[in-house]
Amino acid sequence: MLPTVAHVLDLEVMRRGLPQVVAGADHLERPVRWVHVSELPDVAGMLQGGELVLSTGIALPEDREGLARYVRELADIGVAGLVIEYGRRYFDTLPRALVHAAEQRGLPLIALRRELRFVAVTEAVHALVVNAQLEQLRTSEAIHQVFNELVVEGAEPAEVVRQVARIAGAPVVLENLAHQVLTHDPAGRPEAELLEDWERRSRGVRPPGRTGHDPRTGWLVTTVGARGQDWGRLVLVQEPGPLPESGPHPSTMLLERGASALALNRLVVRDRESLERQTHRTLLAGILTHALTVSEVALRAQALGVPLEGRRLVGAVLRQRRGPIPAALEAQARLRDFTELAASAVRACRLSALVGALDDEGVGVLIALGPQQDEHAALDAFAAALRRLAAEAARDPAAPAPVVAAGSSVGSVRDARRTLLEATQVADAALHDGPGGRTASYYRLPDVRLRGLLHLLRDDARLQTYVERELGPLLAFDAEHNSQLVQMLRIYLEQGRNKSAAADAAHLSRPSFYDRLHKVERILGVDLDQVESCLSLHVALLALDAVRR
């Protein structure tokens, strides 16, 4: 870091001049970028900010207005401080107008009671400045090397966050756009203390720009995203207080470099499946993304021994019931094992199907049924085989069965994408049911409603942005004032916009409840008597529940 005014005053060469702070004593922590010696009263036009100005005062104005203007111009340009030596113009005191102006503008004003060689001061301070700049370059190079290695090695987000916290010596949190913690490193602090009431605390920190500092909390925050799509924030949790008033801060560079590594990590696909599963996954992805033409899919599937043309196709998506969130490597291993388990179930039922991972949590299956095969019997047999194999793998007959969701059958490869997307939506919605919430062996579209659709989209930045746009001001107000306006809005909408019934449900008097509704309208800028506004807010509340999961 650059030397501060206080640091400069403590140098041996400065102490020889018996420095005395006569104004601006509360601002001695300003960084000194350079030292400038000048007697000119209009020197501010030659400065850029951050300089420590040395002068004998011999050419300073005599009148009160001139001295005030001199200080004002220095303060406006952002100088670090003004040092005036006694002996040429002033002997034992500085003009009151000069001292008063410096105190008013918060400009450190130092009097040297003994004559000094200014060149010795400039040499000493400039050596510190150059050393600080060299140290900053060395730090930057070290950070660059660390994160380059992390990117090349394809490090997981948890490792990137750990490195940021290690270098910064402070807790670091990676959150999504809904202010939910994705991964964190407490840097030796109590984990509960760091994460307690995180969403409310995080919502209250909204610095301007992609990277910003909140002096009230001390948090340094930068946005994480790539290719124009933001998906989270990286937060360095520091003690409250401002950053240095000028000069680059190393924590900012560190945090932004970490955010870049996280964004690149999201773009890198690391596939550890078998070659067969990888090929199946490529075909399924080609169907879902239109990356492959219909003829290419059919040709490649035929080559894999899974003929699709002239067959009825049924898309199925498999999800595992959520338990404790595993570590990244463990999650990859579980997904790989789950994919192989699904392939084993397909073979056990003598079905012809493409089987491959669709995302980080689920497996896709595109079943090709022959003319003599019954669709429901095939799905029942597959679901039963999968349950049996999963229980055997877990060595626990009572282990929660995986979710099996199926789309509507289609008659051509061209429509295969539709049945897979439908199955994906059903699978994500089905996870809302407990393991014992359904006796059927698999789920289908009639089980899915709006909640299921929003649950499917819960990790989509566009849905999280929609929630923030619709409810952000109200959530922030609740977080700041510890109020319950979001809950009041939820009750009102759940009661069919019946204010009397809603007041009873909220256990409030009608005037009190009506007053809260009016406050909601003012904060959100909406009219709760308009059906479309209430519909938008209701969808946003359901989406909020989905992203909070």
Image (spheres, grey):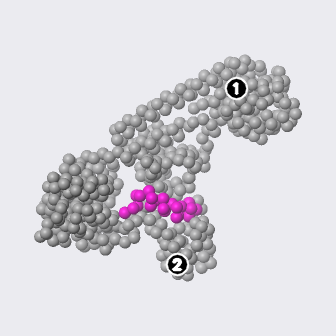
Q: Which residue is mark 2?
A: 497
Q: Could you say which is closer to the camera, residue 47 or residue 16? A: 47
Q: Is residue 542 visible?
A: yes
- Asked whether 3 falls inside the magenta stretch, the response is no
Q: Which residue is mark 1?
A: 36
Q: Which region shows up in magenta?
A: 456-477
Q: CA distance from mark 2 to mark 1?
A: 69 Å
Which residue: 31% across, 74% down?
A: 446
Which residue: 75% across, 36% down?
A: 73
On screen, residue 31 versus residue 465, left or right, reads: right
- Measured as percent of width and height from the top left, residue 342 is found at 20, 58
Q: Is residue 401 above or below residue 70?
A: below
Q: Dominant secondary structure of the magenta stretch?
A: helix
Which residue: 67% across, 22% down?
A: 122
Mark earlier in primary sequence (2, 1): 1
Q: Residue flagged by tag 2: what amino acid is it? A: Arg
Secondary element at image label 1? strand
- Measured as percent of width and height from the top left, residue 126 is found at 63, 23
